[in-house]
């Protein structure tokens, strides 16, 4: 993320980074380290502690010709900014009859599994995906983290990039040097197989890959990468190929993103399917205290169990 | 940084009452300025009164009345340069008329027709903000962004007394101060938020007192005195232009009409007080001032009113002549680069609509 921000601020002088502790501290996850020294306090701005103010002023900054990249310090801390997101960020271009653009990027660490205090663990993607006028991307690898963020910053529409904290901590992988863009709306086939597909995104891609390796079957893993717009072509292609789909999401189940994926499959792939579409998700409870968070999180075991049931169906 | 003192207690006034309170003077305004201000007031008044009629005739939808707010809008806008940005709430829905926006555009907005959605860049007037106070951060961001780019434009944002209770007002005001944004926070304190009186909105003695907490000056002005509003705004414009940051202006008036056409204020307001306040409404006060100075004749009044009435007649005719919007518009403008589902959804919708 940090490399991407350095590249994009260098490439386009209208790009600016703003948020709590992004300047002097370089961000609580170090995503913005070095930007203040390199690009100055006008383009790497330590803001007051006010998430609605951050996103609301970003709307005005766009009107003045800037491309703001707003950091929300944690998933759940972004909720105060929903008023701006829903009422204005997702509507303002429409409201101007297409006269103005609002190329805002909102990035934040999300998700659990990192032994953090309450409200540092949420998976809020469904709220964002449900908001018209917004796009949503979630990387699962270091290279995609750089490439999707670059695509978000260059995109003319508002884009939310959710960065899995678990991947921050655990993932290792090569990241291309210099400019690297992963187009929005394109899924990635993380693993090829022919018997069953596990559809996942963000930190659940690793869990899906773990389950795929543990199953005695040929399992495909589709990493969606962009939740909105969804790569429907890739989703229908894998469903058509394997005929069995398990969807994994860390967020609570009801009206979660997996439900949308399942609905698309039910509408467009029902005749390709050999069994029910299964979901493995978090539960409809507040994200728990961390001593029992492992029981909440979709695990390799839970995904294997669901996949086996489907294979045996 | 200059010391920020508690807000003024007294309301600034220029216009007297023609009897015991003498008229004051404003530097820098000549006869044509005085008449231009009058023309603006009459245009806004005519817009508002005709809109209430159009609503009763079913020609526009629910409408937020701004009768007796005209002096706050016209006086403050007159202190701005054309490059400066205006961020209206729904109470200032027609303020674009002062920037050359056709009445048909604003009427179309209240008719729920897409012809009422303008490009803010055409007038440097942002879109009408419907949710309370949520545009204060936008104005702060624009003003801050202009300062960062070294441009001289400033911004003004209008909101009511109720908006000062909202979180977005607070966050926007604080951002503006911290970022030294060249912004004027213009509060039209008409003392009512639908049915909630100011006393139930705040324990602060004055709304301008809030300014000191943000480290900005707070001015208090009689909101029915167009010249006092103009002068106070001009002072705030000069501060902003000089790089001294934002100013909070509390303009005090009284809401003598219902909140909107859908509201019945007799349920909660003292109608005798309303009648009292109507006697000192802002357009009449200014007209009296100009007549006392010998700057306005009956013929001019008749002519200016007729021009405004003509503009409204032409405006509603144009708005009503707009063709019905095509359903395809549903899928336009939300994204520069829309998701592929939009084209499929539109094709599906057309298949059914075209049956």
Image (cartoon, coloured by chain):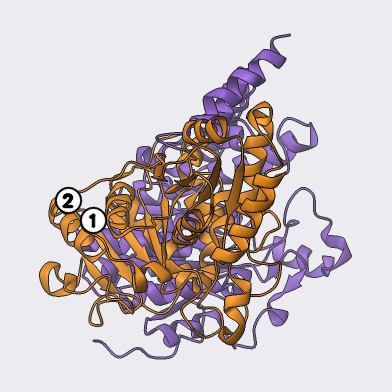
> Most extreme residue toward the right, as rendered?
B267
Q: Position of residue B95 (x, y in %)?
A: 50, 47
Q: Does B276 sit left or right of A22 as displayed?
A: right
Which residue occupies 39% across, 43% down?
Answer: A188
Q: Residue furthest top?
A: B355
Q: In the figure, the orange chain has which letter?
A: A
- Residue located 57% across and 23% down the image: B344
The residue that disc 1 covers is A15
Across and down, in percent, residue A140 comes to 39, 57
Q: Which chain shows up in purple?
A: B
For residue B352, side relative to residue A4 (left or right):
right
What quarter of the picture does the N terminus of chain A occupy? Answer: bottom left
Crowdedness near tag 1: few (<14), some (14–19) or many (≥20) residues, C-alpha within 10 Å: many
Q: Residue at x 45, y 73 (%)?
A: A74
Relative height, residue B348 to residue B178 (above, below): above
Task: Identify the image quadrant of the C terminus of chain A.
Answer: top right
Q: Which residue is mark 2?
A: A12
Tell me the tag on residue A307.
Answer: none
Q: CA distance from mark 1 to mark 2?
A: 6 Å
Where is residue B280? Give x, y as percent.
Answer: 65, 63
- The reply to the same-chain question for discs 1 and 2 is yes
On the image, the x and y values in percent for residue B83 come to: 28, 49
Q: Chain of mark 1?
A: A
Image quadrant where residue A126 sits: bottom right
Camera-nearest residue between B303 and B42: B42
Are dots 1 and 2 in contact, CB under 8 Å?
A: yes
Rendering quarter of residue B325: top right
| Secondary structure beneath label 2 | loop
- Residue A45 in which image quadrant: bottom left
Left-right relation of B142 to A177: right
């Amino acid at each position: 993320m940090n490399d991407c921000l350095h590249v994009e601020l260098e490439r386009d002088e209208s790009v600016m980074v703003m948020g709590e502790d992004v300047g002097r501290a370089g961000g609580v996850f170090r995503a913005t380290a070095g930007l203040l020294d390199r690009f100055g306090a006008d383009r790497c701005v330590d803001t007051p502690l006010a998430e609605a103010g951050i996103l609301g002023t970003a709307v005005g900054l766009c009107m003045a010709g800037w491309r703001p990249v707003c950091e929300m310090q944690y998933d759940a801390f972004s909720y105060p900014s929903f008023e701006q997101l829903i009422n204005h960020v997702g509507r303002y271009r429409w409201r101007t009859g297409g006269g103005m653009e609002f190329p805002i990027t909102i990035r934040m660490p999300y998700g659990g599994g990192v032994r953090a205090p309450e409200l540092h663990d949420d998976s809020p993607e469904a709220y964002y995906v449900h908001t018209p006028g917004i796009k949503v991307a979630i990387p699962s690898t270091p290279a995609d983290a750089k490439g999707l963020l670059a695509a978000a910053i260059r995109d003319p529409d508002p884009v939310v990039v959710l960065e899995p904290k678990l991947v921050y901590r655990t993932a290792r992988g090569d990241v291309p040097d210099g400019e690297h863009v992963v187009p929005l709306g394109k899924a990635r086939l993380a693993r090829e197989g022919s018997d069953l597909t596990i559809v996942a995104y963000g930190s659940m891609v690793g869990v899906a890959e773990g389950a795929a390796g543990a199953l005695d079957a040929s399992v495909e893993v589709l990493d969606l990468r962009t939740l909105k717009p969804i790569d429907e072509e890739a989703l229908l292609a894998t469903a058509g190929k394997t005929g069995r789909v398990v969807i994994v999401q860390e967020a609570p189940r009801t009206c979660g993103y997996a439900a949308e994926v399942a609905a698309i499959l039910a509408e467009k792939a029902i005749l390709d399917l050999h069994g029910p579409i299964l979901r493995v998700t978090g539960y409809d409870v507040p994200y728990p205290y961390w001593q029992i968070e492992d029981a909440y999180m979709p695990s390799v075991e839970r995904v294997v169990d669901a996949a086996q049931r489907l294979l045996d169906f | 940084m200059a010391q920020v003192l508690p807000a003024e207690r007294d309301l600034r006034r220029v216009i007297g009452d023609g009897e015991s309170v003498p008229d004051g003077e404003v530097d820098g305004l000549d006869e044509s300025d005085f008449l231009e201000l009058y023309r603006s007031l009459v245009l806004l008044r005519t817009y508002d009164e005709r809109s209430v009629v159009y609503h009763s005739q079913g020609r526009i939808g629910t409408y937020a009345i701004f009768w007796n707010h005209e002096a706050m809008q016209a006086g403050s806008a007159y202190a701005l340069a054309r490059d400066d940005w205006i961020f209206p709430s729904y109470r200032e829905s027609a303020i674009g008329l002062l920037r050359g926006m056709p009445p048909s555009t604003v009427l179309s907005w209240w008719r729920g027709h897409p012809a009422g959605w303008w490009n803010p860049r055409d007038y440097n007037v942002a879109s009408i903000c419907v949710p309370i106070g949520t545009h204060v951060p936008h104005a702060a961001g624009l003003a801050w962004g202009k300062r960062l780019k070294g441009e001289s434009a400033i911004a003004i944002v209008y909101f009511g007394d109720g908006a000062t209770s909202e979180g977005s007002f607070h966050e926007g005001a604080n951002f503006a101060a911290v970022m030294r944004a060249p912004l004027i926070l213009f509060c039209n304190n008409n003392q009512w938020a639908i049915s909630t009186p100011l006393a139930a909105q705040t324990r602060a003695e004055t709304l301008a007192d809030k300014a000191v907490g943000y480290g900005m000056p707070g001015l208090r002005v009689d909101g029915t005195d167009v010249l006092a509003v103009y002068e106070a705004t001009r002072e705030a414009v000069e501060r902003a232009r000089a790089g001294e940051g934002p100013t909070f202006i509390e303009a005090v008036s009284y809401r003598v009409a219902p909140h909107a056409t859908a509201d019945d204020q007799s349920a909660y307001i003292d109608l005798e007080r309303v009648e009292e306040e109507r006697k000192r409404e802002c357009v009449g006060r200014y007209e009296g001032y100009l007549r006392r100075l010998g700057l306005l004749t009956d013929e001019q009044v008749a002519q200016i009113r007729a021009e405004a009435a003509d503009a409204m007649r032409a405006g509603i005719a144009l708005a009503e002549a707009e063709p019905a919007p095509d359903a395809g518009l549903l899928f336009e403008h939300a994204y520069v680069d829309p998701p592929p589902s939009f084209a499929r959804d539109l094709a599906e919708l057309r298949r059914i609509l075209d049956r």
